[in-house]
Image (cartoon, grey):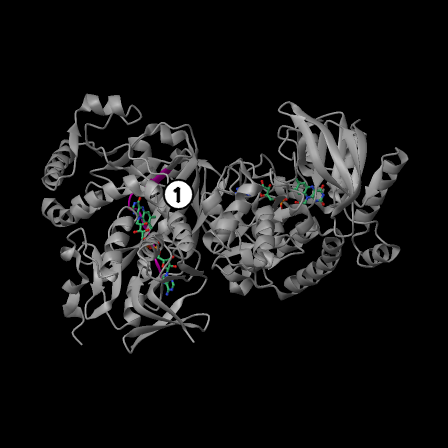
């Protein structure tokens, strides 16, 4: 392990947070390396088609005009050492540096920024593991980066604004949208007004959403509030039917059912932060039910509780692309001043902080407006529903374990005994469902149930790649 | 009024849970107190390997050290019998499979050491024999061709560490043991022939006897009673792969490297063997409540050893690497029995105490219940450290 290359800054994730931080650090002559699993910069929202295509085609750039500028600037910045298609599987303290290990290489960095974004929250309900049931983000990603339309007829169900944007995209691509079911009840005028008042600076987003809604309505797509999916049916070949049910204000299915014969069910209930790299090295996490559940704690200046490790973007709270960008910039400024105290620039930091505050005001509103009812979602799973699809563990197995082991109150105990969360996805798919089930069964708040311990490697890595780090 | 019991068991790992089971089975009243969750620490973090032959760490310092370690072999022989009947005895599945364990050699020196070792083990009555090179690759075609010799101990194998402790606890509870998780023992003092123990929830328990089953925390509990123990905690790491169709039949160990490897019933390959993880320290004192820090050098070393012995492992994705702590006794031999100068305070610890856990629990229960012990454990009496406790 002799002579590892050492950088001033290592950044993990080339989304808006990572790109902004990288540019900020580079502008100030720090040596920067950026790792991303993807083939190009952009992250989830500004994801681009793989090279050689040069187009920055994300429709999200209409929502966030800064996106295109950011991606272009980043791609043009040759002083940054871009390492695409590499998975960072662990970061470790190494004296006064951080050792960053990927499936291809190991580097040292004086400061490390974790900007790993978020992933879609899956919901376990009868039939959710059938081919053809998927997240709306996945539908969007396939359409956007590979031009793949997965079926002809679509039902979309959820609560997240992404639902409407994806419906619009699908429509434009020639799909038939049978219904967009939104679990929350129809917003009252007052709520919409409050939302608009929080908006200054975010007008494009509302305009875009409104325009999508308008297009959907014009195409006579049925958009229903107070509806939720309760069952999907089909076989190994794929989905055939989806049952939607009316639901009450708490999203408890109540009334009439309606069955659709369909090809694809897209669900969109929100995002969960990718915090595992931070937690694996020991950064403290905190519970924030509005902004994604367990998020990485920081000091307001993006410094985590572990020395030399910073966080920005979704792992620090699901707040959207605008916040990710300003947080990334702030992380860059703080890294600069922590490395070279003479270069501290209070004016820029203050400007950034007030921008961050404005973004938060907006994202808090959004979060409140679309916050999923986790309890109702976890109750969609029946006894026979698989909770952990990697290890094929049914809800009934967990219930039986809890009944026989009344001493078990932590999610990690359930994991160890029942194998929920021990599979290939490392718990990303079942964590939130299991936590809610445990919380209901043990009568304790969900945050008391804890979180699966994050372990290296944070993604599965062949043993050989770990044996020669 | 504080709760009154015959025996208070401190710690809900394998030892504590099995002990509670044996105590209530004999009609005694027992309360088990666990500061975290049952099976959360070493007992739920190990590989479940059932080690009966002497391990690498016992032979790496030469034959004389091995002879000393071999004094514990009677316990290993007992444990081999014990595991084979446990599932039937307690009526719960604990995933025992005794399909044989091989210790491998890649050089002629290692082969020679293995030979001496098996002689020593056989002198204690443990079945263990050298395999010819042909026989090795016929029995275990998955091993690298670099393996030139191996010792095969047919009794070795594995049990399920995710389930064994809970199985004991469940049955113990059904038989009347009280189990209190999420509560720590914070102090104890002797009072009119009883131990008055205080718990972190503010309550107290009056117990005639107390058993320390606190794993790496054991010395801290003994210290509450004013007794010093010559033990040190060490941190270890383990890795687990994704599930693959079964192809590794044996428990695999190595005579010249730190490596132990087995494939669980679910298909996960568990890789360990003594690679260090760093214990956290605050002001010179180990902080045992934080999981030991995983070291990149150990990850590399352990997986390198695994891949060079079972090459196919190289392609298999590793899913998680974790750490845990276990306890070493100064003279490398177990501690089983009453503490020096405290006839009503008991302990069992040391060595591969997953393997030895059920044996420790049965023997300790007999001692606590003042019944004859069916195994000579005088060699392991904590009283041998009385000189540390002269007061
Ligand atoms: C599927 C999906 C679709 C979305 N679509 C929209 C949308 O249309 N509109 C919208 O407003 N918001 C959308 N979002 C929300 C969006 O994630 C945020 O608004 C924004 O992209 C967050 O920026 P970020 O920099 O924090 O993270 P991201 O943009 O998510 O960037 C994180 C990057 O880190 C990389 N990464 C993660 N872990 C590792 C690792 N271990 N090793 C190497 N690289 C790693 C990822 O490949 C990714 O490129 C979507 C989110 C998802 C998950
Ligand atoms: C990584 C690793 C791999 C291993 N592999 C193997 C193997 O393959 N085979 C083998 O035979 N052995 C193995 N071992 C050793 C084996 O796991 C341990 O020796 C054994 O599990 C010890 O069991 P225990 O019940 O004594 O301790 P533990 O399982 O640690 O239980 C002790 C319990 O006491 C509790 N406690 C502590 N203080 C208090 C207090 N004040 N109040 C209340 N409760 C308290 C703790 O919270 C803990 O739950 C391994 C160990 C490690 C760490």
Between A278 and A72, the residue placed more toward the observer is A278
Q: Name the image quarter holding the N terminus of chain A.
A: top left
User: Residue at the spot x=78%, y=27% of the render?
Assistant: A175
The reply to whether residue A3 is in sight is no
Residue B202 rendering spot, x and y as whole percentages: 45, 73
User: Residue at the spot x=53%, y=65% of the render?
Assistant: A342
Please, is residue B354 above or below residue B329 in the view? Answer: above
Between B220 and B96, the residue placed more toward the observer is B96
Please, is residue A384 above or below residue A433 in the view? Answer: above
- Looking at the rendering, the quadrant in which ligand 1 lies is top right
Chain at numbered mark 1:
B
Q: Residues within 10 Å of mark 1 (few under 14, many from 20)?
A: some
User: Residue at the spot x=75%, y=53% of the render?
Assistant: A366
Residue A176's image quarter?
A: top right
Between A462 and A356, the residue placed more toward the observer is A462
Residue that extends furthest to the right in the rendered view of this protein: A218
User: Residue at the spot x=66%, y=65% of the render?
Assistant: A350
What residue did someone put label 1 on?
Answer: B92
Please provide the residue range marked out in magenta: B270-280
Q: Name the image quarter holding the C terminus of chain A.
A: top left
Q: Is mark 1 within 8 Å of ligand 2?
A: no
Task: Specify whether residue B276 is painted magenta.
Answer: yes
Residue B48 rendering spot, x and y as whole percentages: 33, 43
Residue A162's image quarter?
A: top right
């Amino acid at each position: 392990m002799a002579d590892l290359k050492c950088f001033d800054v290592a950044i993990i994730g080339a989304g808006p947070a990572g790109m902004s931080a990288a540019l900020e650090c580079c502008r100030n002559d720090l040596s920067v390396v950026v790792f991303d699993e993807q083939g190009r910069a952009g992250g989830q929202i500004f994801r681009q088609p793989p090279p050689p295509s040069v187009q920055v085609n994300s429709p999200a750039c209409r929502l966030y005009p800064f996106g295109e500028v950011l991606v272009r600037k980043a791609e043009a910045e040759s002083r940054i050492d871009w390492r695409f298609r590499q998975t960072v599987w662990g970061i470790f303290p190494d004296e006064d540096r951080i050792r960053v290990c990927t499936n291809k290489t190991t580097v040292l960095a004086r400061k490390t920024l974790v900007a790993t974004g978020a992933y879609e929250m899956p919901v376990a309900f009868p039939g959710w593991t059938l081919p053809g049931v998927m997240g709306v983000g996945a539908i969007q990603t396939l359409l956007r980066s590979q031009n793949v339309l997965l079926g002809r007829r679509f039902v979309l169900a959820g609560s997240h604004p992404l639902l409407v944007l994806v419906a619009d995209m699908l429509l434009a691509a020639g799909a038939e949208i049978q219904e967009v079911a939104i679990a929350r009840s129809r917003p009252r005028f007052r709520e919409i007004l409050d939302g608009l008042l929080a908006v200054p600076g975010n007008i494009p987003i509302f305009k875009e959403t409104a325009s999508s809604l308008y297009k959907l309505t014009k195409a006579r797509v049925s958009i229903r509030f107070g509806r939720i999916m309760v069952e999907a049916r089909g076989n190994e070949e794929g989905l055939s039917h989806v049952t939607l049910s009316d639901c009450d204000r708490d999203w408890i299915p109540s009334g009439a059912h309606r069955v659709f014969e369909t090809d694809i069910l897209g669900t969109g209930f929100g995002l969960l932060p990718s915090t595992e790299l931070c937690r694996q090295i020991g950064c403290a996490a905190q519970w924030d039910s509005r902004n994604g559940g367990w998020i990485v704690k920081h000091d307001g200046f993006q410094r985590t509780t572990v020395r030399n490790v910073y966080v920005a973007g979704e792992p620090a709270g699901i707040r959207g692309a605008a916040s990710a960008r300003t947080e990334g910039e702030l992380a860059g400024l703080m890294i600069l001043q922590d490395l070279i105290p003479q270069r501290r620039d209070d004016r820029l930091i203050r400007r950034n902080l007030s921008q961050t505050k404005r973004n938060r005001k907006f994202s808090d509103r959004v979060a409140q407006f679309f916050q999923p009812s986790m309890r109702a979602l976890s109750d969609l799973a029946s006894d026979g529903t698989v909770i952990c699809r990697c290890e094929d563990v049914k809800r009934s197995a967990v219930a039986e374990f809890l009944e026989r082991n009344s001493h078990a109150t932590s999610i990690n105990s359930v994991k160890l005994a029942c194998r929920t969360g021990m599979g290939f996805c490392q718990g990303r798919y079942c964590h939130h469902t299991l936590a809610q089930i445990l919380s209901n069964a043990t009568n304790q708040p969900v945050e008391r149930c804890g979180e699966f311990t994050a372990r290296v490697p944070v993604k599965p890595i062949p043993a050989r790649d770990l044996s020669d780090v | 009024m504080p709760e009154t019991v015959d025996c208070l068991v401190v710690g809900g790992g394998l030892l504590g849970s099995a002990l509670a089971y044996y105590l209530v089975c004999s009609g005694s009243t027992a309360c088990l107190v666990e500061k975290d969750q049952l099976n959360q620490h070493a007992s739920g973090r190990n590989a479940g390997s059932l080690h009966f032959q002497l391990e690498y760490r016992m032979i790496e310092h030469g034959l004389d050290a091995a002879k000393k370690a071999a004094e514990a072999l009677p316990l290993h022989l007992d444990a081999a019998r014990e595991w084979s009947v446990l599932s039937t005895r307690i009526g719960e599945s604990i995933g025992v499979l005794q399909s044989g364990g091989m210790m491998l050699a890649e050089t002629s020196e290692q082969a020679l050491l293995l030979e001496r070792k098996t002689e020593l083990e056989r002198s204690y009555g443990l079945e263990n024999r050298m395999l010819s090179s042909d026989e090795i690759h016929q029995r275990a075609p998955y091993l690298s061709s670099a393996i030139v010799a191996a010792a095969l101990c047919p009794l070795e194998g594995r049990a399920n560490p995710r389930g064994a402790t809970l199985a004991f606890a469940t049955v113990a509870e059904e038989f009347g043991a009280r189990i209190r998780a999420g509560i720590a023992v914070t102090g104890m003092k002797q009072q009119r022939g009883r131990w008055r123990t205080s718990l972190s929830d503010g309550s107290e328990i009056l117990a005639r006897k107390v058993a320390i089953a606190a794993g790496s925390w054991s010395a801290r509990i003994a210290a509450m009673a004013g007794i010093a123990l010559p033990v040190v905690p060490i941190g270890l790491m383990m890795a687990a792969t994704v599930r693959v169709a079964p192809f590794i039949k044996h428990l695999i160990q190595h005579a010249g490297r730190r490596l132990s490897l087995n494939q669980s019933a679910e298909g996960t390959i568990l890789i360990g063997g003594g690679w260090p993880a760093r214990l956290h320290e605050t002001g010179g004192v180990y902080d045992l409540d934080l999981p030991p820090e995983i070291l990149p050098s150990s990850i590399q070393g352990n997986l390198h050893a695994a891949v060079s012995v079972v090459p196919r492992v190289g392609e298999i994705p590793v899913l998680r690497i974790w750490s845990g702590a276990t306890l070493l006794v100064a003279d490398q031999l177990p501690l089983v029995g009453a503490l020096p100068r405290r006839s009503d305070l008991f302990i069992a610890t040391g060595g591969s105490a997953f393997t030895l856990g059920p044996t420790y629990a049965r023997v300790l229960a007999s001692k606590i219940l003042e019944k004859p012990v069916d195994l000579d454990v005088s060699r392991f009496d904590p009283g041998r450290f009385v000189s540390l406790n002269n007061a």
